[in-house]
Amino acid sequence: MTRIAALVSIAILIFAPIPIGQAQGPGTPAMEGQRVGKVLNVRKVLRNPYFLSRYPSTHYYLLYFAVRVSGQTYCSEYETPVLDEIEDVFSAKDKDVEFVLKGKNLKLRTLQGRTIKAHLVEGKQC
C-alpha cells in the first residue's frame, strides 16, 4: 500500500501545475497605460465581400472612430458583425471613455462596459 501511495504522490508532484510568479489582478500591465479620452467621430462602413451565393451571408461592418486625449487624436478601425457593438460606440460619441493604447492597438471600453479591440489607422479614414 505504501508503494501505491508513493507512486500517487510522485505523479501529483510531476503533473500538478506549478504556479510561477504572482497572479495577475486588476492592475495588470495591459491596463497601466489606461487613459480617458473623448470619442469625436464615428463612421460605419458595410464591408461587402464580393462573394455571391444563393445563401444569405453575415454582414460585416468596418467601424472607424476617433478618440482625442490631451491634444492628440487617435483614429482606429474595428471590424464586427455585431450591431450592438456598433450602437455602443455610436452612443459614446462626444463622451469620455476609457481606452488603452498599446503599440498599434487601441482597446476602448464603451459606456455599457464592452471592450472594443481596434487597431490604429491613418487619420484621413476617420
Image (cartoon, rainbow, N blue to C red):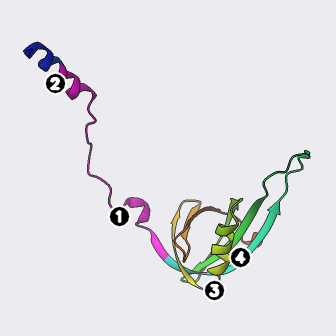
Instruction: Name the outermost residue toward the left.
Output: 2
Seen from the viewer's position, the closer of residues 109 and 2 is 2
Q: Which residues are magenta?
A: 8-35
Q: Identify the amino acid type marked 4.
A: Val
Q: Identify the amino acid type marked 2.
A: Ser
Mark-to-mark CA distance, 2 and 1: 35 Å
Which-is-in-front pick, marks 3 and 2? 2
Mark-to-mark CA distance, 4 and 2: 59 Å
Q: Which residue is mark 3?
A: 94
Compare marks 3 and 1 and give the one earlier in the sequence. Answer: 1
Compare marks 2 and 1 and give the one earlier in the sequence. Answer: 2
Which percent across, then down, holds residue 33?
44, 68
Instruction: Name the outermost residue toward the front.
Output: 1
Which-is-in-front pick, marks 4 and 2? 2
- CB within 8 Å, label 2 to label 1: no
Q: Which residue is mark 1?
A: 26
Which percent across, then down, holds residue 78?
67, 62
In the image: residue 55, left or right of residue 124: right
Mark-to-mark CA distance, 3 and 2: 61 Å
Residue 99 on the magenta segment:
no
Q: Which residue is mark 4?
A: 42
Residue 9 disc label: 2
Which percent across, then down, holds residue 42?
71, 76
Q: Residue at x 29, y 52 (%)?
A: 23
Label 2 neighbourhood size at 10 Å, few (<14), some (14-19), many (20+)?
few
- CB within 8 Å, label 3 to label 1: no
Element assignment for label 2 = helix
Where is residue 12, by image quadrant? Answer: top left
Element assignment for label 3 = loop
Q: Is residue 105 above or below residue 39?
A: above
Mark-to-mark CA distance, 1 and 4: 29 Å
